[in-house]
Amino acid sequence: MNAPASAAGLAPAESLKIRDIEVQGEVGPLAARIYTAGVPGAKKSSLIVFFHGGGFDDGDLEDADDFLRCLVLGNADQVVLASNYTLASVRPFPAAVEDAHAVLVWAKKNKAKLGWTGQQMLVSGIEAGANLAAVCAMMSRDRGGPALAGQVLIMPMLDPGLSTCSMRSLPTCPELVEVADACAAAYRGYLPNAADRSHPYASPLQSSRLKNLPPALIVSSEDDPLRDEAEQYGSKLIACGIKTTVRRMPAAPLQDATARNECACKVQVLGEIASFVAGLCKEPAS
């Protein structure tokens, strides 16, 4: 999906630049990708660090590639760094979240390589990647940085207990049942130790320590089994005094139940992210 160059604030498609690099994870290098658009060589004021979906045990940089191309073309004053992380099939929790936070630390130290001014960092992800993004916000708070200006959680997986109504009371739709079953299997692989399922770095929805987190944009979908946990998390953040925007996207038909990144790209989420980031420009990082 190409963004029209004539629209306000959008960069021409030919200005899109993508570079594959390596970043530092918790214990070793990770494959990553930098997306920029607009004036060549111009440093960007905002950095979005993005983590892909895949249920913790699958997925890579290709999964959200189209989405991130559109995201950068929609706002040429930001650079996106998409990073892999250790999958649960290699090492389970907390390997992925430790990698994710290490990537934020690496990004803060490597502003020049990213073409970023260092002014504003956000963390984002979709589904399992959104879990990592939410947890990174907690870890950055708990570990004294890096400072985050915002968190963007797209259809996030936040509840290993799979206890919400939208997860338990599914319509008779094979595609949605498939998503719910995949979530259950994903958590079994990511959290093989049952005791970890209540850890706030694994289950953000169950955390009792949600104060002093950065502003959040949380995007759910009308027909998504993850919908209620996303919206409940937003309500909990608001109750803790966190500036939070919660948006529910209308249902979008999918030809393939795994094509959820494509769905997120093609509905209104890109506009929501652009508005959210623009609204942060006058706010200091938390």
Image (cartoon, grey):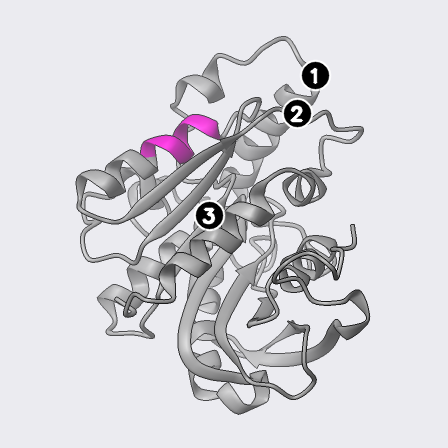
Graded by Cα atoms within 10 Å as few (under 14), some (14 to 19) or many (20 or more), the crowding at tag 3 reads: many
**Contact (Cβ within 8 Å) of mark 3 with mark 1:** no
Element type at mark 1: helix
* Main SS of residues in magenta: helix
| Distance between the alpha carbons at the discs numbered 3 and 1 | 25 Å
Image position, residue 75 (x, y; %):
59, 64
Element type at mark 3: strand
> Which badge, 2 or 3, comes first in the chain's sequence?
3
Graded by Cα atoms within 10 Å as few (under 14), some (14 to 19) or many (20 or more), the crowding at tag 2 reads: few
Residue at the spot of label 2: 178
> Which numbered disc covers residue 15?
none
Question: Relative to 239, does residue 65 appear above or below in the rendering?
Answer: below
Identity of the amino acid at label 2?
Answer: Glu
Image position, residue 10 (x, y; %):
66, 62
98 or 235, nearer to the observer: 235
Residue at the spot of label 3: 153
The magenta-colored residue range is 227-232
Taking the magenta stretch, the answer to whether it contains residue 159 is no
191 or 47, nearer to the observer: 47
Residue at the image point whose x is 55% and y is 34% from the top:
183
Residue at the spot of label 1: 174
**Contact (Cβ within 8 Å) of mark 1 with mark 2:** yes
Quarter of the rendering containing residue 90: bottom right
| Distance between the alpha carbons at the discs numbered 2 and 3 | 22 Å
